[in-house]
Amino acid sequence: MKYLLDTHTLLWGLYDSSELSPAAIRIMSKESCCISIASLWEMAIKNSLGKLSLSQSILTISSKCKEYGIEMIPIKPEHCQAITILPFIHKDPFDRIIIAQAKTEDMAILTKDSFIPMYDVKTLW
């Protein structure tokens, strides 16, 4: 099984946050993990709006992902199509594309977000 990291999970994992659950720590250290390119986009937007303070550039974060073996998932037309049938439980466009990618690619999402499991997608925390 592959795991798709939600944006907060990636950031907490890269910067050794105490916010990570024991299960998240275990999965991120032993399993095949991916991130959506949308997570980098989300970080860039939130950083430019002042809603997120990044200590490193997006390019550095991307390089760290590669260094740690975290695969980057592009946004495909199939993922965009999958969004069209998602109910509007969660209005965040970044979370919606991550949900669509996980459903389309048969991955579990590693997230603390309590709304994401409402989409009938595999989640772990």
Image (spheres, helix red, strand yellow):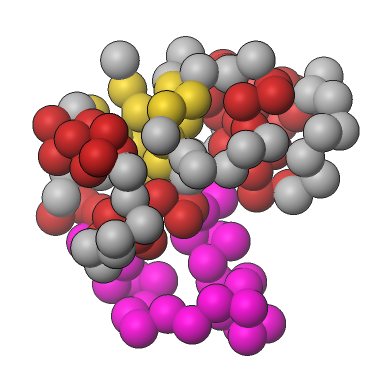
Q: Residue at x 56, y 28 (%)?
A: 101
Q: Is residue 66 left or right of residue 95?
A: left
Rendered view: 110 above or below 119: below
Q: Give the position of the N terminus as an image quadrant.
A: top left
Give above or below for 54 relative to 97: below
Q: Residue at x 58, y 18 (%)?
A: 121
In which quarter of the view is residue 3 placed? top left
**Extent of the magenta region:** 37-64
Q: Is 11 situated left or right of 75 in this image?
A: left
Seen in the picture, residue 86 relative to 12 is either above or below; the reply is above
- Would residue 55 be found to the left or right of residue 29 on screen? right
On the image, the x and y values in percent for residue 38 come to 55, 50
Residue 36: percent from left, percent from top? 47, 43
Front residue (pair 37, 42): 42
User: 15 or 35: which is nearer to us?
Assistant: 15
Counting every numbered tag in the picture gives 0
Front one among 68 and 90 = 90
Residue 38 part of the magenta segment: yes
Residue 63: percent from left, percent from top: 23, 62
The relative height of residue 34 versus residue 93 in the rendered view (above or below) is above
